[in-house]
Amino acid sequence: MNALKRMPVTFLPHGGGPWPFVDMGLDRTEVEELAGYLRSVRELPKVTPKAILVISAHWEARVPTVMTAERPPMLYDYSGFPPESYAIKWPARGEPKVAARVRELLGADGIESAEDPHRGFDHGTFVPLKVAYPAADIPTVQLSLQRGLDPATHLAFGRALAPLRDEGVFIVGSGMSYHNMGGFGRPDALAVSESFDAWLRDTTRRDARDRNARLLAWSNAPSARGAHPREEHLMPLMVIAGAAGDEVGHTSFHGKIMGVRLSAYDFG
């Protein structure tokens, strides 16, 4: 596959719960801006991907674990929302061959992995991709994070998986640049999110060596623990940065939702 057809990689914010599909009382301008960005994600690859690999913040396992179902079910891993939130469908098919290739690449770098034939699409996958790919017409596979949430470990996952980009697989990290459940709605939430977001935007546009060194030490960044008391929503970015290789990042979304600043980053 030539360079023109090499797949980009992206880290995107998936928002809160089923926000695009039910009325959650959110600011409609903010909702439309984020939904509009997610709709644009489909146009990011220059050619149609043969599959999508999603690293979702909402799945952690002992070792990186890949879903292998040919027809993945829905996993409504949220609570307290209207009944229609639990009837959302996104019937993309799985791709066992891509799942096997994920394990092969991880294994080639000495990374232990596992598979799960029963796992369904959690909302870190089906919410943003239902907006980006409403026809559910691209086979999709999810890969878990590894418990412990070590940045170096997840950067290594991305480096191992980078060859997928030349095999037609669009790698998507689904998380949030701000994720403090106790912070949403607080008077200082916007300032905290903007402080950390500014650091992330600066970090992703640096050369790979500097970028990755900063990401490894992310908890020293301004407002880091205010933005991420627990870092599961940041770890998909580590995988994406690893898969980006020497490419410099681009901030493809810089908006707000639920009163906090969020960004998305593309490479390639």
Image (spheres, helix red, strand yellow):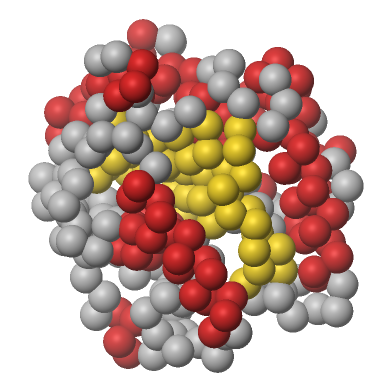
> Which quarter of the image is occupied by the N terminus?
top left
Quarter occupied by residue 253: bottom right
Q: Residue at x 66, y 68 (%)?
A: 256
Q: Residue at x 40, y 22 (%)?
A: 161
Residue 259 shown left or right of residue 264 in the figure: right
Along the line of sight, which residue is nearer the eye, 210 or 71?
210
Percent of width and height locating residue 45? 34, 37
Along the line of sight, which residue is nearer the eye, 107 or 199?
199
Q: Is residue 120 above or below residue 210?
A: below
Percent of width and height locating residue 80? 47, 85
Quarter occupied by residue 123: bottom left
Percent of width and height locating residue 61? 44, 41
Along the line of sight, which residue is nearer the eye, 41 or 230?
41
Does any portion of residue 218 appear in the rendered image?
yes
Q: Is residue 199 above or below residue 72?
A: above
Residue 75 shown left or right of residue 266 in the figure: left
Q: Is residue 191 above or below residue 7?
A: below
Q: Residue at x 58, y 43 (%)?
A: 265
Residue 30 shown left or right of residue 191 in the figure: left
Q: Is residue 99 above or below residue 134?
A: above
Q: Residue at x 43, y 10 (%)?
A: 109
Direction left: furthest residue: 70
Does any portion of residue 126 appear in the rendered image?
no
